[in-house]
Each structure stands twice: as structure tokens, then as C-alpha cells.
Image (cartoon, grey):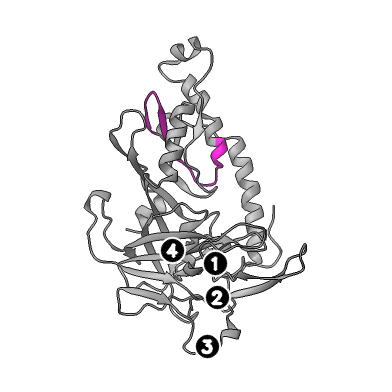
């Protein structure tokens, strides 16, 4: 689908959505708006009339900006492109990171829906060396997606081969027994921190978009009946403008990181220069668009992530999707009980940034 005749701006305007983290010297930092700003300028709740009772209800106010209008056109085009690509997609043996009797782990490419990856597994299994064994069975394994990745997120995708194993992994993910890492390419002012943990609320606004809420809003009801849930991510800077060193997962330093507890809108100075930042993210919760939302809040949105203020065009090139990669999953094997770590190779954009 062609874009509108006007050329999209190289960056979604930040003047409309100011976003800059202000980090103090202390270990635990709370994001605050400008000192002594009147409460009426930035209310923490908004009154909405319940259509059934006609009683005003104070709902929490999201602290991250609404979706930029230009993102609707770009996202629609990307969705159509992904649908076409997904309809033709088939897994190859080179995409398989691990396989045993109970699991198959694959490296999902960018721009392909999870369901299309799952639907292509049977043909891959039939083409495997033990296809005769599979054909002698009454049916193929009972395949289930154990984790889901956004359309444009690449990386480790876990698929189970039975209902029983799937149920065990659902419990493991729900209880946060599965550890995950992601790699993201961000554009924004170089962070003054090496490691930082951000804690906030997460929920859908009345317009249906996922937004960041104050940590103190966790448990509060939102329009539509859902509630604000907790969201926590640890970030680690790997490189800035190509300067840095990729650290393996086994050599993570135990340096003390800063902790941000989100309570107010952050501020972004649009005049600050833009740097290329490669980060590793360790989500401590499993919320929809969690890393993308927290990168936006920190003022370093992911390149290509137009939904959350990431650049659509950078250095003369336009991007077909956001640059976020599911690097690894680690957990106890649901059958053997042994610790396992599955890691996907870095995509080209990440290796080039180092």
C-alpha cells in the first residue's frame, strides 16, 4: 500500500510528545515533572462518567504519549506486507536452534507472524530424517506456541510438541521462571547510565493503545474494566555510536544499577543530539510491548518503531520494522528438569553496531 504523497518526516516530532528521563545521583530515582508544576497541568487521574451509573470515575492517566498519527499509515502498510510474506513463509533446518522429543526452538525472522511460523513446523518435521516415524503415527505432534513475539521482533521462539509440556511451560512463563533477554537498537541521547531498572504500570488507554502508567497506579481500574499491571525491565548499554563491546550472557557484571520508579511524565529535550545506542533488555515481567514502551519512556525509542516514537527514516534509509531481537530464553527443561539456554544469532543490524 503506498504511503501518502507527502514524505514522512525523518523522525516523529518529539516537540508534541516531550520525553526525556531526568536521572538524579541517588540509586533510586523517581521521574518527576518540572518542579512545582501545578497539579492541574498534569493530573494523575481523569474523571470519566460511567454510562450506566452516570457517576464520575477517576481513572489513572497514562504517562506515555498517544500513538503518533503518522504511525497508522505506516503500520497498515507493514501489516499488509507481513501478511503477504507470512503466507509464503516456510521454516528451513537452518532456522532451528534446538529440537528434541518435546520441544523445537526456532529463530523467527522479522516481519513474519508467529502463527505462520507455527503452521510451517509440520512440513519441517515431515522433511526431517525421522519422517518415516512421524508418518507411522496417527497424527503429528500437538504443536503449541510457548512464547509469542511481535510481528517485527526477530529471535528465539519456543514451540512445544504436546499439551502436557505446553501446560508446564505456561506455568513457567506465568511464574516468571523463564529468563529472557532482548537486543534493541535505539536512537536518542546517549544514556548517562550503564545499567538501569525501570519500574512502572502498564495498561490499555481508553483508545485501546498500550501505555505506561505510574507505578502507584498498579491495581487501579482502567476504562473498559482492565487494571493497571506492574512492568519492570533492566537495561544494559552495549554500545554507543559503534563504541562498546558485546558481552556474552555468561559474563554479566554485577554492577549496581540505577532504579527508576515511574510516577510522572518524563521530559525530552528535542534539541539534544541523537546517538545510536545498542542495549540489552532483561524483562522482569511479561507485558505486551514492554521493552518498546520502556525504551520510549527513557527517551531512546527503538529504531523503526513508529508506534512508540522511533525513527522511520535514519541516515537516508527507511525502516520496514522495529529493530528488536529476542536474544535468549533460559529455564528448566519441562521434562528432564535440566537447565537449558537457547540463544539466537545476532541480526545484522546488531552485529554492525558493535
Q: Do the residues labelled 2 and 4 touch (CB within 8 Å)?
A: no
Q: What stretch is highlighted in magenta?
A: 97-116
Q: In this view, does 202 lie to the left or right of 46?
A: left
At 59% from the left and 35% from the top, the residue drawn is: 88
Which residue in the structure is indicated by mark 4?
186
Residue 275: say if magenta. Answer: no
CA distance separating discs 4 and 1: 11 Å
User: Which of the two residues, 58 or 253, is positioned nearer the viewer here?
Assistant: 58
At 49% from the left and 22% from the top, the residue drawn is: 141
Crowd rating for badge 1 (residues with CA inside 10 Å; few <14, some 14–19, many 20+): many
Crowd rating for badge 2 (residues with CA inside 10 Å; few <14, some 14–19, many 20+): some
Q: Is mark 2 on a helix, strand or loop?
A: loop
Which residue in the structure is indicated by mark 2?
14
Q: Are marks 4 and 1 in contact (CB under 8 Å)?
A: no
Q: Is mark 3 on a helix, strand or loop?
A: loop
Q: Are marks 2 and 3 in contact (CB under 8 Å)?
A: no
Dividing the picture into quadrants, the one containing residue 272 is: bottom left
Q: Which of marks 3 and 4 is nearer the N terminus?
A: 3
Q: Are marks 2 and 1 in contact (CB under 8 Å)?
A: yes
Q: Which of marks 3 and 1 is nearer the N terminus?
A: 3
Mark in front: 2 vs 3? 3
Q: Which of marks 2 and 3 is nearer the N terminus?
A: 2
Image coordinates of residue 44 in percent, x first then y, are: 57, 76
CA distance separating discs 2 and 1: 8 Å
Which residue in the structure is indicated by mark 3?
37
Which residue in the structure is indicated by mark 1?
309
User: Which of the two residues, 142 or 317, is positioned nearer the viewer here?
Assistant: 142
Amino acid at each position: 500500500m503506498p504511503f501518502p504523497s507527502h514524505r514522512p518526516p525523518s523522525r516523529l516530532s518529539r516537540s508534541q510528545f516531550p520525553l526525556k528521563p531526568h536521572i538524579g545521583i541517588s540509586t533510586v530515582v523517581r521521574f518527576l515533572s518540572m518542579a512545582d508544576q501545578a497539579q492541574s497541568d498534569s493530573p494523575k487521574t481523569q474523571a470519566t462518567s460511567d454510562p450506566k451509573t452516570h457517576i464520575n470515575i477517576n481513572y489513572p492517566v497514562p504517562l506515555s504519549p498517544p500513538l503518533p498519527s503518522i504511525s497508522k499509515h505506516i503500520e497498515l502498510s507493514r501489516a499488509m506486507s507481513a501478511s503477504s510474506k507470512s503466507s509464503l513463509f516456510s521454516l528451513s533446518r537452518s532456522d532451528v536452534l534446538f529440537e528434541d522429543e518435546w520441544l523445537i526452538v526456532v529463530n523467527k525472522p522479522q516481519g513474519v507472524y508467529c502463527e505462520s511460523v507455527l503452521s510451517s513446523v509440520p512440513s519441517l518435521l515431515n522433511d526431517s530424517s525421522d519422517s518415516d516415524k512421524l508418518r507411522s503415527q496417527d497424527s503429528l505432534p500437538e504443536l503449541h506456541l510457548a512464547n509469542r513475539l511481535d510481528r517485527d521482533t526477530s529471535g528465539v521462539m519456543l514451540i512445544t510438541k504436546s499439551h502436557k509440556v505446553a501446560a508446564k511451560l505456561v506455568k513457567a512463563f506465568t511464574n516468571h521462571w523463564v529468563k529472557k533477554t532482548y537486543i534493541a537498537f535505539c536512537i536518542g541521547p546517549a544514556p548517562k547510565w550503564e545499567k538501569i531498572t525501570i519500574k512502572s504500570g502498564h495498561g490499555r488507554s481508553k483508545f485501546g493503545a498500550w501505555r505506561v502508567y505510574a507505578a502507584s497506579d498498579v491495581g487501579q481500574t482502567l476504562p473498559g474494566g482492565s487494571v493497571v499491571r506492574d512492568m519492570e525491565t533492566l537495561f544494559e548499554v552495549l554500545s554507543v555510536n559503534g563504541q562498546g563491546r558485546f558481552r556474552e550472557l555468561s559474563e554479566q557484571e554485577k554492577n549496581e544499577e540505577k532504579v527508576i520508579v515511574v510516577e510522572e511524565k518524563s521530559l525530552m529535550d528535542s534539541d539534544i543530539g541523537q546517538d545510536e545506542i545498542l542495549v540489552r533488555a532483561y524483562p522482569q515481567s511479561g507485558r505486551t510491548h514492554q521493552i518498546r514502551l520502556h525504551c520510549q519512556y527513557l527517551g531512546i525509542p527503538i529504531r523503526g518503531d513508529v508506534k512508540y516514537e522511533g525513527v522511520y527514516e535514519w541516515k537516508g534509509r527507511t525502516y520496514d520494522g522495529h529493530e528488536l531481537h529476542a536474544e535468549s530464553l533460559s529455564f528448566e527443561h519441562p521434562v528432564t528438569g535440566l537447565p537449558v539456554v537457547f540463544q539466537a544469532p545476532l541480526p545484522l543490524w546488531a552485529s554492525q553496531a558493535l
